[in-house]
Image: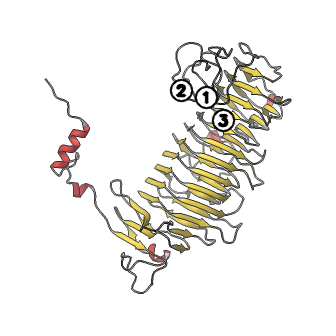
């Protein structure tokens, strides 16, 4: 009889022998590195970076070249002013860590005091940054950031983790450039050597009161046919080189002048379990809650987005120009002045393969869905639930195409619930021939477009977005292949006709 050795048993055996699975000793596998301390309230005399004689300025902290396993620690309860721009890099087995130390109740604070960046991680890799307070409020209106990652003709940078930060009062400018103003900016610059990030985790950060962006990506290596004429080739000359292994999760963002999160030139990114509350609050430009530009295969799920401040965009989600195969699923959108979803290629670009499924929306307006000029191809909006009580959107679909003959839209809206407790609204602006409806539930809404298989009876929608017992929306939807496998509540999707809306379970008493 052959015995199976589990991974846990193998780890225990090798640890007991002092050897890793790769054949290295434990000491070789996990180099300890050096530890440096910074206390900007300490006496600067004799500062060496030790715990007993810590550095007292950010310039001192940025002077050495750091290596694998090194740690740069800031004392809790103290404040350092200026820019932290460390040199060197960690390794896959032993990242360079920037964090805090001490038992003080208050965080260690870094205050940019009007500098362009508070923390600048430039042309480096394998860095973990966390557990600090970062602010940059002085001289408001100029260009600045809280944390900026920057690659300039570097190649591929790996192994970044940004977590546990409290970033607030970053008072920058209101314009979108390669080095604009944001809480966390991921910038790829240069023209000579294609550069990108591989392995970037941004999680459990609290971001508040930022002008303009929350989390913002930009790359000069972004040129491809899909993007059309949206970017000046002199400014963005490099062939499309996407960042990979990107995950943005469990962050809280509040009171943002502009966008919550913008992904740009990424492939396979996942954005999940974030809370965006209050965006597009102080900007005359167009902004959205979470959106993509020039990306492939992005999954945006399990997020809650609310408080879009005006109708210059101002919706929760946006698949923008050159977005390909973007999936919005299992999200909660509510109380956004602009609405729920924007699909916006414009300027000769294309937006392809957008899917919005099993989301719920409450009191979003002035339109639930908006389309821009340009090709919108293979777009599916299905099994979502829209409930409007205090606010009634002016448009269910607002299509901004100047003429149906000048654009190409392939947009199907199926198996959705639309319930209104108000009057009016839900019009259609410039509906194109490619816009189709079937098997939707419209209640409290005058519906004039063809809706084969749909219902107008009360679907018995509960406040928790489930369906009541005897709902006519139960098992009344059209079968859709590759539907994600579960509903907004986590219920498994079973074979056969699905419910209409975001709930797949039985009717609730």
Q: Determine whether 268 is above or below 416 in the image.
A: below
Label 2: which secondary element: loop
**Around disc 2, counting alpha carbons within 10 Å, would you say few (fewer than 14), some (14 to 19), or many (20 or more)?**
few
Tag 2 or tag 3, which sits nearer the N-term?
3
**Around disc 3, counting alpha carbons within 10 Å, would you say few (fewer than 14), some (14 to 19), or many (20 or more)?**
many
Label ID, residue 358: 1
How far apart, in angstroms, are the residues tagged by discs 2 and 1? Answer: 9 Å
Tag 2 near tag 1, CB within 8 Å: yes
> Is residue 320 at least partly visible in the picture?
no
Tag 1 or tag 2, which sits nearer the N-term?
1
How far apart, in angstroms, are the residues tagged by discs 1 and 3? Answer: 21 Å
Near-viewer residue (440 or 126): 440
Q: Position of residue 149 (x, y in %)?
A: 52, 59
Q: Position of 286 compared to 474: left or right?
A: right
Residue for point 21% across, 40% down: 10
* Residue receiving disc 2: 484
Please say which color scheme the image uses: secondary structure
Q: Determine whether 241 is above or below 490 in the image.
A: below
**Around disc 1, counting alpha carbons within 10 Å, would you say few (fewer than 14), some (14 to 19), or many (20 or more)?**
many
Q: Position of residue 466 (x, y in %)?
A: 63, 25
Q: Position of residue 293 (x, y in %)?
A: 63, 44
Residue for point 61% across, 71% down: 115
Depth check, mark 1 against mark 3: the one in front is: 1
Label 1: which secondary element: loop
* Residue receiving disc 3: 351
């Amino acid at each position: 009889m052959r015995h199976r050795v589990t991974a846990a048993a193998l780890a225990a055996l090798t640890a007991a022998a002092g050897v890793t699975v790769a054949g290295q000793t434990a000491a070789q596998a996990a180099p300890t590195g050096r530890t440096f301390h910074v206390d900007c309230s300490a006496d600067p005399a004799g500062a060496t970076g030790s715990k007993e004689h810590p550095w007292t300025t950010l310039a001192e902290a940025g002077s050495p070249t750091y290596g694998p396993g090194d740690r740069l620690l800031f004392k809790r309860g103290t404040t350092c002013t200026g820019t932290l721009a460390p040199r060197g890099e960690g390794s896959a087995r032993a990242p360079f860590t920037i964090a805090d130390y001490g038992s003080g109740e208050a965080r260690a604070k870094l205050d940019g005091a009007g500098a362009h960046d508070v923390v600048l991680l430039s042309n480096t890799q394998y860095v973990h940054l966390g557990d600090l307070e970062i602010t940059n409020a002085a001289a408001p209106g100029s260009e600045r950031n809280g944390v900026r990652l920057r690659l300039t003709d570097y190649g591929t940078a790996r192994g970044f983790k940004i977590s546990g930060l409290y970033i607030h009062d970053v008072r920058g400018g209101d314009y979108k450039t390669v080095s604009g103003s944001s809480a966390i900016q991921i910038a790829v610059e240069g023209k000579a050597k294609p550069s990108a990030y591989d392995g970037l985790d941004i999680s459990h950060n609290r971001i508040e009161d930022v002008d303009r962006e929350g989390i913002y990506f930009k790359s000069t290596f972004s040129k491809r046919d899909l993007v059309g004429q949206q970017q000046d080739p002199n400014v963005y000359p490099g062939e499309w080189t996407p960042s990979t292994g990107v995950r943005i999760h469990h962050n809280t963002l509040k009171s943002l002048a502009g966008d919550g999160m913008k992904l740009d030139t990424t492939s396979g990114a996942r954005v999940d379990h974030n809370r965006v509350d209050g965006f597009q609050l102080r900007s005359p430009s167009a902004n959205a809650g979470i959106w993509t530009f020039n990306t492939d295969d992005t999954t945006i799920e399990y997020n809650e987005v609310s408080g879009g401040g005006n109708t210059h965009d101002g919706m929760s989600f946006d698949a923008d120009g050159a977005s390909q195969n973007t999936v919005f699923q299992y999200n909660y959108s509510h109380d956004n002045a602009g609405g729920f979803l924007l699909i916006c290629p414009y300027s000769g670009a294309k937006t392809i393969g957008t899917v919005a499924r099993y989301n719920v929306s409450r009191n979003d307006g002035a339109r639930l869905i908006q389309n821009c000029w340009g090709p919108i191809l293979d777009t599916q909006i299905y099994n979502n639930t829209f409930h409007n009580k205090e606010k009634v959107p002016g448009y269910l679909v607002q299509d901004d195409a100047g003429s149906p003959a000048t654009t190409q839209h392939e947009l199907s809206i199926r198996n959705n619930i639309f319930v209104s407790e108000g009057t009016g609204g839900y019009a259609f602006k410039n509906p194109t021939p490619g816009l189709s409806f079937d098997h939707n539930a419209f209640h409290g809404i005058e519906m004039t477009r063809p809706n084969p298989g749909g219902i107008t009876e009360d679907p018995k929608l509960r406040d928790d977005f489930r369906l009541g017992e005897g709902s006519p929306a139960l098992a009344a939807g059209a079968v859709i292949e590759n539907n994600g496998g579960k509903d907004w509540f986590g219920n498994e999707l079973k074979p056969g006709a699905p419910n209409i809306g975001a709930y797949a379970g039985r009717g609730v008493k």
